[in-house]
Protein backbone atom coordinates (compact mmCIF):
# COMPACT_ATOMS: atom_id res chain seq x y z
CA UNK A 1 0.00 0.00 0.00
CA UNK A 2 3.04 2.27 -0.20
CA UNK A 3 1.71 3.53 -3.52
CA UNK A 4 -1.08 5.30 -1.65
CA UNK A 5 1.41 7.37 0.29
CA UNK A 6 1.26 11.07 -0.59
CA UNK A 7 3.75 12.65 1.78
CA UNK A 8 3.00 16.26 2.83
CA UNK A 9 4.28 18.48 0.02
CA UNK A 10 7.41 20.49 0.73
CA UNK A 11 6.91 24.15 1.62
CA UNK A 12 9.45 26.72 0.53
CA UNK A 13 9.63 30.48 1.00
CA UNK A 14 11.74 30.81 -2.19
CA UNK A 15 8.98 29.12 -4.16
CA UNK A 16 6.38 31.61 -2.96
CA UNK A 17 8.64 34.58 -3.81
CA UNK A 18 9.11 33.03 -7.21
CA UNK A 19 5.30 32.73 -7.60
CA UNK A 20 4.99 36.53 -7.28
CA UNK A 21 7.74 37.04 -9.89
CA UNK A 22 6.00 34.70 -12.31
CA UNK A 23 2.64 36.42 -11.78
CA UNK A 24 4.17 39.83 -12.49
CA UNK A 25 5.85 38.45 -15.63
CA UNK A 26 2.57 36.94 -16.84
CA UNK A 27 0.59 40.12 -16.21
CA UNK A 28 3.08 41.96 -18.39
CA UNK A 29 3.22 39.26 -21.07
CA UNK A 30 -0.46 38.36 -21.31
CA UNK A 31 -2.41 41.19 -19.72
CA UNK A 32 -5.32 40.46 -17.41
CA UNK A 33 -8.38 40.44 -19.66
CA UNK A 34 -9.77 37.63 -21.85
CA UNK A 35 -7.56 36.62 -24.78
CA UNK A 36 -8.63 35.47 -28.24
CA UNK A 37 -8.85 31.70 -28.59
CA UNK A 38 -5.62 30.14 -29.82
CA UNK A 39 -6.63 27.19 -31.99
CA UNK A 40 -3.66 25.09 -30.96
CA UNK A 41 -5.08 23.19 -28.02
CA UNK A 42 -6.46 23.63 -24.53
CA UNK A 43 -3.17 24.44 -22.87
CA UNK A 44 -3.18 28.00 -24.06
CA UNK A 45 -1.33 27.89 -27.38
CA UNK A 46 2.02 27.35 -29.11
CA UNK A 47 4.32 30.38 -29.05
CA UNK A 48 8.07 30.05 -29.67
CA UNK A 49 8.49 33.75 -28.75
CA UNK A 50 6.83 33.20 -25.36
CA UNK A 51 8.88 30.02 -24.75
CA UNK A 52 12.10 31.95 -25.48
CA UNK A 53 11.14 34.70 -23.04
CA UNK A 54 10.40 32.07 -20.40
CA UNK A 55 13.80 30.50 -21.09
CA UNK A 56 15.48 33.89 -20.75
CA UNK A 57 13.92 34.23 -17.27
CA UNK A 58 15.46 30.87 -16.27
CA UNK A 59 12.10 29.11 -15.99
CA UNK A 60 12.78 26.17 -18.30
CA UNK A 61 15.03 23.23 -17.45
CA UNK A 62 14.77 24.62 -13.93
CA UNK A 63 15.87 21.48 -12.05
CA UNK A 64 18.69 20.51 -14.45
CA UNK A 65 22.42 20.94 -13.79
CA UNK A 66 23.85 24.32 -14.78
CA UNK A 67 26.36 22.69 -17.12
CA UNK A 68 23.43 21.74 -19.38
CA UNK A 69 21.81 25.17 -19.30
CA UNK A 70 19.67 24.31 -16.26
CA UNK A 71 19.25 26.29 -13.06
CA UNK A 72 19.56 23.68 -10.27
CA UNK A 73 16.34 24.78 -8.64
CA UNK A 74 13.91 22.51 -6.79
CA UNK A 75 11.06 20.50 -8.29
CA UNK A 76 8.70 22.55 -6.14
CA UNK A 77 9.96 25.79 -7.73
CA UNK A 78 9.41 24.25 -11.16
CA UNK A 79 5.95 23.21 -10.01
CA UNK A 80 5.07 26.75 -8.93
CA UNK A 81 6.12 28.20 -12.30
CA UNK A 82 4.11 25.60 -14.20
CA UNK A 83 1.06 26.07 -12.00
CA UNK A 84 1.08 29.83 -12.61
CA UNK A 85 1.54 29.36 -16.36
CA UNK A 86 -1.42 26.98 -16.50
CA UNK A 87 -3.65 29.13 -14.31
CA UNK A 88 -2.93 32.09 -16.63
CA UNK A 89 -3.64 29.90 -19.67
CA UNK A 90 -0.20 30.82 -21.00
CA UNK A 91 0.96 29.48 -24.39
CA UNK A 92 3.24 26.67 -23.20
CA UNK A 93 2.75 24.09 -25.90
CA UNK A 94 5.97 24.80 -27.80
CA UNK A 95 8.32 23.87 -24.96
CA UNK A 96 6.08 21.84 -22.63
CA UNK A 97 6.92 18.27 -23.70
CA UNK A 98 10.66 18.99 -23.94
CA UNK A 99 10.78 20.64 -20.53
CA UNK A 100 8.47 18.13 -18.83
CA UNK A 101 9.73 14.78 -20.10
CA UNK A 102 12.12 14.68 -23.09
CA UNK A 103 14.85 16.76 -21.41
CA UNK A 104 14.65 14.76 -18.15
CA UNK A 105 14.74 11.51 -20.16
CA UNK A 106 17.95 12.61 -21.93
CA UNK A 107 19.41 13.81 -18.66
CA UNK A 108 18.85 10.38 -17.15
CA UNK A 109 19.53 8.02 -20.05
CA UNK A 110 21.03 10.09 -22.92
CA UNK A 111 24.68 10.23 -23.98
CA UNK A 112 26.87 13.17 -23.03
CA UNK A 113 26.84 14.27 -26.68
CA UNK A 114 22.99 14.25 -26.77
CA UNK A 115 22.72 16.18 -23.51
CA UNK A 116 25.15 18.87 -24.63
CA UNK A 117 23.55 19.19 -28.05
CA UNK A 118 19.97 19.53 -26.87
CA UNK A 119 19.46 20.41 -23.20
CA UNK A 120 20.81 24.00 -23.29
CA UNK A 121 18.56 24.73 -26.28
CA UNK A 122 15.51 23.34 -24.45
CA UNK A 123 16.35 25.45 -21.40
CA UNK A 124 16.61 28.51 -23.66
CA UNK A 125 13.09 27.82 -25.01
CA UNK A 126 14.44 27.21 -28.51
CA UNK A 127 14.06 23.47 -29.01
CA UNK A 128 10.77 21.56 -29.01
CA UNK A 129 10.01 17.84 -28.80
CA UNK A 130 7.19 15.53 -29.81
CA UNK A 131 6.34 12.10 -28.42
CA UNK A 132 6.63 9.15 -30.85
CA UNK A 133 4.88 6.39 -28.90
CA UNK A 134 1.35 5.67 -30.25
CA UNK A 135 0.77 3.79 -33.51
CA UNK A 136 -2.39 3.02 -35.51
CA UNK A 137 -2.71 -0.38 -33.79
CA UNK A 138 -0.82 0.29 -30.58
CA UNK A 139 -1.84 3.10 -28.24
CA UNK A 140 -2.65 1.70 -24.83
CA UNK A 141 -0.63 -1.43 -25.43
CA UNK A 142 2.73 -0.04 -26.50
CA UNK A 143 4.16 -3.57 -26.45
CA UNK A 144 2.33 -3.90 -29.78
CA UNK A 145 4.42 -1.14 -31.44
CA UNK A 146 5.52 -2.27 -34.91
CA UNK A 147 7.74 0.57 -36.10
CA UNK A 148 11.10 -1.10 -36.43
CA UNK A 149 14.71 0.08 -36.55
CA UNK A 150 17.16 -2.34 -38.14
CA UNK A 151 20.97 -1.99 -37.82
CA UNK A 152 22.58 -1.09 -41.13
CA UNK A 153 25.92 -2.66 -42.20
CA UNK A 154 28.49 0.11 -41.93
CA UNK A 155 26.70 1.87 -39.07
CA UNK A 156 23.41 3.41 -38.08
CA UNK A 157 19.80 2.20 -38.22
CA UNK A 158 17.06 2.11 -40.85
CA UNK A 159 13.55 2.91 -39.55
CA UNK A 160 10.20 2.00 -41.11
CA UNK A 161 6.73 2.41 -39.61
CA UNK A 162 3.97 4.85 -38.72
CA UNK A 163 3.30 6.85 -35.56
CA UNK A 164 -0.04 8.52 -34.90
CA UNK A 165 -1.62 11.26 -32.75
CA UNK A 166 1.80 12.93 -32.56
CA UNK A 167 1.08 16.36 -31.07
CA UNK A 168 2.87 19.28 -32.79
CA UNK A 169 5.12 16.97 -34.88
CA UNK A 170 5.04 19.57 -37.65
CA UNK A 171 6.51 22.27 -35.40
CA UNK A 172 8.96 20.26 -33.28
CA UNK A 173 12.68 19.92 -33.81
CA UNK A 174 12.99 16.39 -32.38
CA UNK A 175 10.97 13.30 -31.61
CA UNK A 176 11.74 10.69 -28.98
CA UNK A 177 10.94 7.62 -31.06
CA UNK A 178 9.92 4.42 -29.30
CA UNK A 179 10.31 1.44 -31.63
CA UNK A 180 11.16 -2.21 -31.92
CA UNK A 181 14.79 -3.24 -32.51
CA UNK A 182 14.67 -6.83 -31.26
CA UNK A 183 12.23 -9.55 -30.37
CA UNK A 184 10.15 -10.07 -27.25
CA UNK A 185 11.15 -13.09 -25.22
CA UNK A 186 8.96 -15.76 -23.67
CA UNK A 187 9.62 -14.31 -20.24
CA UNK A 188 9.44 -10.63 -21.23
CA UNK A 189 7.01 -9.18 -23.79
CA UNK A 190 8.53 -5.76 -23.11
CA UNK A 191 12.01 -6.76 -24.28
CA UNK A 192 13.43 -5.58 -27.60
CA UNK A 193 12.45 -1.88 -27.67
CA UNK A 194 14.79 1.09 -28.13
CA UNK A 195 14.33 4.88 -27.97
CA UNK A 196 15.98 7.19 -30.52
CA UNK A 197 16.56 10.93 -30.61
CA UNK A 198 15.20 11.80 -34.06
CA UNK A 199 15.88 15.09 -35.84
CA UNK A 200 12.52 15.79 -37.51
CA UNK A 201 14.29 17.12 -40.62
CA UNK A 202 15.81 13.70 -41.36
CA UNK A 203 14.95 12.61 -44.94
CA UNK A 204 12.20 9.98 -45.19
CA UNK A 205 9.95 11.42 -42.46
CA UNK A 206 6.50 12.46 -43.72
CA UNK A 207 4.06 14.36 -41.49
CA UNK A 208 0.32 14.20 -42.27
CA UNK A 209 -1.90 16.48 -40.18
CA UNK A 210 -5.06 15.12 -38.50
CA UNK A 211 -7.92 17.50 -37.80
CA UNK A 212 -9.49 17.09 -34.36
CA UNK A 213 -13.18 17.53 -33.48
CA UNK A 214 -12.62 21.23 -32.65
CA UNK A 215 -11.27 21.80 -36.15
CA UNK A 216 -7.68 22.27 -34.98
CA UNK A 217 -4.76 20.55 -36.68
CA UNK A 218 -2.31 19.95 -33.91
CA UNK A 219 -1.77 16.27 -34.05
CA UNK A 220 -0.44 14.14 -36.85
CA UNK A 221 0.39 10.88 -38.47
CA UNK A 222 4.19 10.57 -38.85
CA UNK A 223 5.42 8.09 -41.44
CA UNK A 224 9.00 6.76 -41.42
CA UNK A 225 10.16 5.39 -44.78
CA UNK A 226 13.70 4.02 -44.82
CA UNK A 227 14.79 6.75 -42.43
CA UNK A 228 18.50 6.50 -41.62
CA UNK A 229 19.48 7.31 -38.04
CA UNK A 230 23.09 7.43 -36.81
CA UNK A 231 24.23 5.19 -33.93
CA UNK A 232 24.57 8.37 -31.87
CA UNK A 233 20.75 8.71 -31.93
CA UNK A 234 20.23 5.71 -29.60
CA UNK A 235 19.03 6.82 -26.16
CA UNK A 236 20.23 4.60 -23.32
CA UNK A 237 20.74 0.91 -23.89
CA UNK A 238 19.27 -0.73 -27.02
CA UNK A 239 16.50 -3.14 -25.96
CA UNK A 240 15.96 -1.39 -22.60
CA UNK A 241 13.48 1.28 -23.66
CA UNK A 242 10.50 -0.13 -21.77
CA UNK A 243 12.08 0.76 -18.43
CA UNK A 244 13.05 4.21 -19.74
CA UNK A 245 9.50 4.75 -20.99
CA UNK A 246 7.96 3.90 -17.62
CA UNK A 247 9.85 6.62 -15.79
CA UNK A 248 9.06 9.10 -18.61
CA UNK A 249 5.33 8.38 -18.20
CA UNK A 250 5.46 9.30 -14.49
CA UNK A 251 6.69 12.75 -15.56
CA UNK A 252 4.05 12.96 -18.29
CA UNK A 253 1.13 12.17 -15.98
CA UNK A 254 1.75 13.67 -12.57
CA UNK A 255 1.86 17.42 -13.13
CA UNK A 256 -0.71 20.18 -12.63
CA UNK A 257 -1.42 20.16 -16.39
CA UNK A 258 -3.63 17.14 -15.60
CA UNK A 259 -6.11 19.13 -13.54
CA UNK A 260 -5.66 22.71 -14.74
CA UNK A 261 -6.45 22.16 -18.44
CA UNK A 262 -9.99 23.51 -17.93
CA UNK A 263 -9.08 26.05 -15.24
CA UNK A 264 -9.93 28.90 -17.59
CA UNK A 265 -13.55 27.66 -17.71
CA UNK A 266 -13.67 27.45 -13.91
CA UNK A 267 -12.47 31.06 -13.54
CA UNK A 268 -14.89 32.23 -16.23
CA UNK A 269 -17.73 30.41 -14.46
CA UNK A 270 -16.79 31.91 -11.10
CA UNK A 271 -16.81 35.40 -12.69
CA UNK A 272 -20.16 34.74 -14.35
CA UNK A 273 -22.02 33.47 -11.26
CA UNK A 274 -20.06 35.47 -8.74
CA UNK A 275 -21.14 38.93 -9.81
CA UNK A 276 -23.06 40.24 -6.83
CA UNK A 277 -23.99 37.45 -4.43
CA UNK A 278 -23.80 33.92 -5.93
CA UNK A 279 -26.79 31.71 -5.13
CA UNK A 280 -26.33 29.01 -2.52
CA UNK A 281 -26.45 26.37 -5.27
CA UNK A 282 -23.71 28.14 -7.24
CA UNK A 283 -21.56 28.64 -4.16
CA UNK A 284 -21.87 24.95 -3.29
CA UNK A 285 -21.04 23.75 -6.81
CA UNK A 286 -18.04 26.06 -7.15
CA UNK A 287 -16.89 25.23 -3.61
CA UNK A 288 -17.07 21.50 -4.30
CA UNK A 289 -15.01 21.85 -7.48
CA UNK A 290 -12.47 24.12 -5.77
CA UNK A 291 -12.12 21.70 -2.84
CA UNK A 292 -11.37 18.86 -5.24
CA UNK A 293 -8.76 21.00 -6.98
CA UNK A 294 -7.11 21.76 -3.65
CA UNK A 295 -6.78 18.03 -2.91
CA UNK A 296 -5.38 17.31 -6.36
CA UNK A 297 -2.95 20.16 -6.00
CA UNK A 298 -1.73 18.74 -2.73
CA UNK A 299 -1.28 15.30 -4.32
CA UNK A 300 0.52 16.73 -7.33
CA UNK A 301 2.82 18.87 -5.15
CA UNK A 302 3.55 15.77 -3.11
CA UNK A 303 4.62 14.05 -6.34
CA UNK A 304 6.97 17.00 -7.00
CA UNK A 305 8.52 16.25 -3.60
CA UNK A 306 8.95 12.58 -4.53
CA UNK A 307 10.66 13.54 -7.80
CA UNK A 308 12.95 15.80 -5.81
CA UNK A 309 13.83 12.79 -3.62
CA UNK A 310 14.76 10.79 -6.73
CA UNK A 311 11.74 8.48 -6.56
CA UNK A 312 9.70 7.17 -9.53
CA UNK A 313 6.11 7.97 -8.46
CA UNK A 314 4.44 6.08 -11.32
CA UNK A 315 1.29 5.00 -9.45
CA UNK A 316 0.85 8.36 -7.73
CA UNK A 317 1.20 10.08 -11.13
CA UNK A 318 -1.51 7.83 -12.57
CA UNK A 319 -3.80 8.68 -9.64
CA UNK A 320 -3.32 12.44 -10.14
CA UNK A 321 -4.10 12.12 -13.83
CA UNK A 322 -7.15 9.91 -13.42
CA UNK A 323 -8.74 12.00 -10.67
CA UNK A 324 -7.78 15.28 -12.36
CA UNK A 325 -9.22 14.44 -15.77
CA UNK A 326 -12.42 13.05 -14.20
CA UNK A 327 -12.90 16.29 -12.28
CA UNK A 328 -12.29 18.47 -15.34
CA UNK A 329 -14.55 16.43 -17.58
CA UNK A 330 -17.41 17.12 -15.14
CA UNK A 331 -16.97 20.90 -15.30
CA UNK A 332 -19.22 21.53 -18.35
CA UNK A 333 -22.06 19.84 -16.43
CA UNK A 334 -21.48 22.16 -13.47
CA UNK A 335 -21.72 25.13 -15.84
CA UNK A 336 -24.91 23.79 -17.42
CA UNK A 337 -26.54 23.34 -14.01
CA UNK A 338 -25.80 26.94 -13.05
CA UNK A 339 -26.14 28.98 -16.22
CA UNK A 340 -28.32 29.02 -19.30
CA UNK A 341 -25.50 29.34 -21.82
CA UNK A 342 -25.33 28.20 -25.43
CA UNK A 343 -21.84 26.78 -26.15
CA UNK A 344 -20.37 28.67 -29.12
CA UNK A 345 -16.68 28.61 -30.03
CA UNK A 346 -16.90 31.90 -31.88
CA UNK A 347 -19.02 33.77 -29.35
CA UNK A 348 -17.82 37.09 -27.94
CA UNK A 349 -19.31 36.01 -24.62
CA UNK A 350 -16.37 34.46 -22.73
CA UNK A 351 -18.37 31.76 -20.92
CA UNK A 352 -20.02 30.59 -24.17
CA UNK A 353 -16.70 30.14 -26.01
CA UNK A 354 -14.91 28.68 -22.97
CA UNK A 355 -17.54 25.98 -22.40
CA UNK A 356 -17.65 25.14 -26.12
CA UNK A 357 -13.87 24.71 -26.12
CA UNK A 358 -13.88 22.43 -23.09
CA UNK A 359 -16.82 20.34 -24.34
CA UNK A 360 -14.88 19.65 -27.54
CA UNK A 361 -11.54 18.94 -25.85
CA UNK A 362 -12.59 17.26 -22.59
CA UNK A 363 -13.07 13.76 -24.05
CA UNK A 364 -9.37 13.77 -24.97
CA UNK A 365 -8.27 14.53 -21.37
CA UNK A 366 -8.79 10.90 -20.34
CA UNK A 367 -7.23 9.52 -23.55
CA UNK A 368 -3.98 11.47 -24.09
CA UNK A 369 -1.10 10.42 -21.87
CA UNK A 370 -2.81 7.07 -21.09
CA UNK A 371 -6.51 6.22 -21.00
CA UNK A 372 -8.59 6.04 -17.84
CA UNK A 373 -8.84 2.24 -18.03
CA UNK A 374 -5.09 1.81 -18.48
CA UNK A 375 -4.29 4.14 -15.58
CA UNK A 376 -6.73 2.29 -13.34
CA UNK A 377 -5.20 -1.07 -14.34
CA UNK A 378 -1.79 0.34 -13.32
CA UNK A 379 -3.11 1.77 -10.07
CA UNK A 380 -4.73 -1.57 -9.18
CA UNK A 381 -1.46 -3.37 -9.90
CA UNK A 382 0.48 -0.83 -7.83
CA UNK A 383 -1.89 -1.43 -4.92
CA UNK A 384 -1.45 -5.18 -5.22
CA UNK A 385 -5.09 -5.68 -6.25
CA UNK A 386 -4.37 -7.42 -9.59
C1 LIG B 1 -5.14 15.09 -27.75
C2 LIG B 1 -4.25 13.89 -27.85
C3 LIG B 1 -2.90 14.05 -28.02
C4 LIG B 1 -2.08 12.93 -28.13
N1 LIG B 1 -0.73 13.13 -28.31
C5 LIG B 1 0.07 12.06 -28.45
C6 LIG B 1 1.46 12.24 -28.74
O1 LIG B 1 1.95 13.37 -28.84
N2 LIG B 1 2.24 11.15 -28.91
C7 LIG B 1 1.73 9.88 -28.81
O2 LIG B 1 2.51 8.94 -28.94
N3 LIG B 1 0.42 9.67 -28.57
C8 LIG B 1 -0.42 10.73 -28.40
N4 LIG B 1 -1.76 10.53 -28.17
C9 LIG B 1 -2.27 9.16 -28.20
C10 LIG B 1 -2.76 8.60 -26.88
O3 LIG B 1 -1.69 8.39 -26.00
C11 LIG B 1 -3.50 7.29 -27.23
O4 LIG B 1 -4.66 7.67 -27.96
C12 LIG B 1 -3.90 6.54 -26.02
O5 LIG B 1 -2.77 6.00 -25.39
C13 LIG B 1 -4.89 5.39 -26.35
O6 LIG B 1 -4.45 4.60 -27.40
P1 LIG B 1 -5.42 4.26 -28.64
O7 LIG B 1 -5.94 5.53 -29.19
O8 LIG B 1 -4.68 3.32 -29.55
O9 LIG B 1 -6.66 3.48 -28.01
P2 LIG B 1 -6.78 1.94 -27.66
O10 LIG B 1 -5.55 1.48 -27.00
O11 LIG B 1 -7.23 1.22 -28.91
O12 LIG B 1 -7.96 1.94 -26.60
C14 LIG B 1 -9.35 2.02 -26.98
C15 LIG B 1 -10.20 1.84 -25.71
O13 LIG B 1 -9.95 0.52 -25.13
C16 LIG B 1 -9.53 0.65 -23.78
N5 LIG B 1 -8.52 -0.38 -23.47
C17 LIG B 1 -7.41 -0.68 -24.20
N6 LIG B 1 -6.71 -1.64 -23.59
C18 LIG B 1 -7.36 -1.95 -22.44
C19 LIG B 1 -7.10 -2.85 -21.35
N7 LIG B 1 -6.03 -3.62 -21.34
N8 LIG B 1 -7.98 -2.86 -20.33
C20 LIG B 1 -9.08 -2.05 -20.31
N9 LIG B 1 -9.37 -1.18 -21.32
C21 LIG B 1 -8.52 -1.13 -22.36
C22 LIG B 1 -8.92 2.04 -23.68
O14 LIG B 1 -8.97 2.51 -22.34
C23 LIG B 1 -9.82 2.85 -24.61
O15 LIG B 1 -11.00 3.23 -23.94
C24 LIG B 1 -2.62 11.62 -28.05
C25 LIG B 1 -4.00 11.45 -27.90
C26 LIG B 1 -4.81 12.57 -27.80
C27 LIG B 1 -6.30 12.34 -27.64
Image: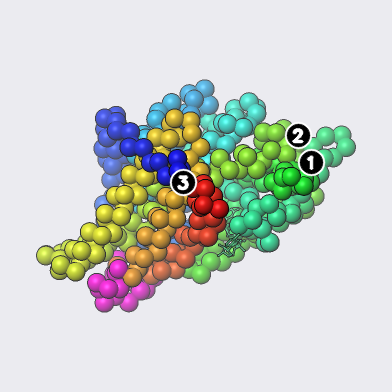
Q: Give percent across and percent down for residue 21.
A: 28, 36
Q: Residue furthest top?
A: 67
> Which circle, 3 or 1, is nearer the viewer?
3
For image coordinates 63% across by 32% down, the residue present is: 110
| Mark before the other along the chain sequence, 2 or 3 | 2
Q: Residue at x 39, y 30 (%)?
A: 74
Say which element carries label 2: helix
Structural crowding at the residue carrying mark 2, measured as other residues with C-alpha within 10 Å and reported as few (<14), some (14–19) or many (≥20): few
The residue positioned 29% from the left and 31% from the top of the image is 12
Query: Which of the colour schemes (rainbow, by chain, secondary structure, one colour) is used?
Result: rainbow
- The picture places residue 162, in percent across and down from the top left corner, at 71, 56
The residue singled out by tag 1 in the image is 157
* Cα distance between the residues tagged 2 and 3: 33 Å
Residue 348 forms part of the magenta stretch: yes
Which of the two discs, 2 and 1, labels the residue nearer the N terminus?
A: 1
Q: Position of residue 325 (x, y in %)?
A: 42, 58
Q: Which residues are magenta?
A: 334-350
Q: Quadrant of residue 108?
A: top right
Which of the labelled discs sits on residue 317, or is there none?
A: 3
- Labels 2 & 1 near each other (Cβ < 8 A): yes
In percent of width and height, residue 316 lies at 45, 45
Is tag 3's residue or tag 1's residue first in the polypeptide sequence?
Answer: 1
Q: Nearer the viewer, residue 363 or 87?
A: 363
Q: Label for residue 231?
A: 2
Instruction: Classify mark 1: helix, strand or loop.
Output: strand
Instruction: Judge left or right: residue 218 versus residue 299.
Output: right
Residue at x 55%, y 42% (from the top left corner): 248
Q: Is residue 223 visible?
A: no
Amino acid sequence: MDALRFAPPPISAEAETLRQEVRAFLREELGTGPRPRDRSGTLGGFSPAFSRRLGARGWLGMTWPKRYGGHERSYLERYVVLEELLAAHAPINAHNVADRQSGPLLLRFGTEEQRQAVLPRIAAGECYFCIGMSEPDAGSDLAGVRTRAVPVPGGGWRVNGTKIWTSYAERCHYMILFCRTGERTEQDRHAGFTQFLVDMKTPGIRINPIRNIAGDRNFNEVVFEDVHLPDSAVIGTPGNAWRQLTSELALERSGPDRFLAAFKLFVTLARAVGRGEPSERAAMALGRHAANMVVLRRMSRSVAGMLQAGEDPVVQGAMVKDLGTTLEQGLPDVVRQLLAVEPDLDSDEEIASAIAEIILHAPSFSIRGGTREILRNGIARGLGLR
